Amino acid sequence: MESQNDNDLTPAIEIEDLRFAWRSGMDPVLEIERLHIPRGEHVFIEGPSGTGKSTLLSLVAGVILPQQGRVWVHGQSLESMSGAARDQFRADQIGYIYQMFNLIPYLSIVENVTLPCRFSSQRRDRATSRSGDLIGEATRLLETLGIDTSSIGSRSAVELSVGQQQRVAAARALIGVPGLIIADEPTSALDTEHREAFIRLLFQECDREDTTLVLVSHDTSLAGMFDRKVRLPDINTVSLGS
């Protein structure tokens, strides 16, 4: 029987002999021999536009599957699951911060944050165990990330500044303590000062629960804040643009 300590040693992400092309017969966009990310690590993945960063994130999230190789997340082989099982695993275990935030315009800020808990009973239970109820946990996360819910908590997402939308998107990804947070160019619309402040807040909340953070960006100025930097062109053997 697997012990809790054994489970803690299972990598957050393990990729082996991965090959991905968008369609059969097309040249691959990713060929990665191995990528290993331990649990709780903050990893910065960088590379120029068009080098497959977002594609890699979609593979890690199980949105798409490789034609060859294996992708494990928390010891689970994504390609061995059915589509429905991958969807549920993603809902339970992965928080995703999108580049354009993808907030629902007709929902309030708090409703946007609690949305993942509608699709995952595990995240709902973990969120309520933290603060007593979903609204309480959403409020805690928002205020930790610098959103004053007493003044703007009932506003819709479209009424927010870019910086506020970014924080709401982060709170939505973090609610319910997913084991893995994936962030796709989440700071691209912010200036340097606000980018660094946001990253520090994100680290703070991830460290609270030993959550793994994988952030991709072409902006290398943030890389020094992370435990490790991975250059995608160094691990992807495909010569894109050649």
Image (spheres, grey):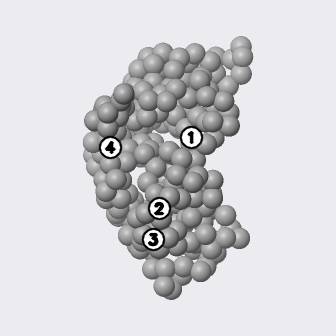
Q: Measuring 35% from the left and 34% from the top, which residue is drawn there? A: 7
Q: Earlier in the sequence, mark 3 or mark 4?
A: 4
Amino acid at the residue labelled 2: Ala
Q: In the rendering, which numbered label is found on residue 132?
A: 3
Tell me the mark number nearer the camera, choosing from 3 and 2: 3
Q: CA distance from mark 1 to mark 3?
A: 24 Å
Q: Are marks 1 and 2 in contact (CB under 8 Å)?
A: no
Mark 1 or 3, nearer chain start:
1
* Residue pointed to by mark 4: 40
Q: Nearer the viewer, mark 3 or mark 4?
A: 3
Element assignment for label 3: loop
Q: CA distance from mark 4 to mark 1?
A: 18 Å
Please, what secondary structure does the residue beneath circle 4 have? loop
Judging depth in this view, the residue of 77 and 22 nearest the camera is 77
Q: Quadrant of residue 145?
A: bottom left
Residue 31 appears in view? no
Q: Of marks 4 and 1, which one's residue comes earlier in the chain?
A: 4
Sequence order check: which comes first, mark 3 or mark 2?
2
Q: Nearer the viewer, mark 1 or mark 3?
A: 3
**What is the spatial separation of the Cα atoms under label 2 and label 4, in whole angstroms?**
19 Å
Identify the disc placed on residue 127.
Answer: 2
Quadrant for the C terminus, please: top right
* Label 2 SS: helix
Identify residue type, mark 3: Gly
**Residue at label 1?**
89
The reply to whether the C-beta atoms of the residues labelled 1 and 3 are less than 8 Å apart is: no
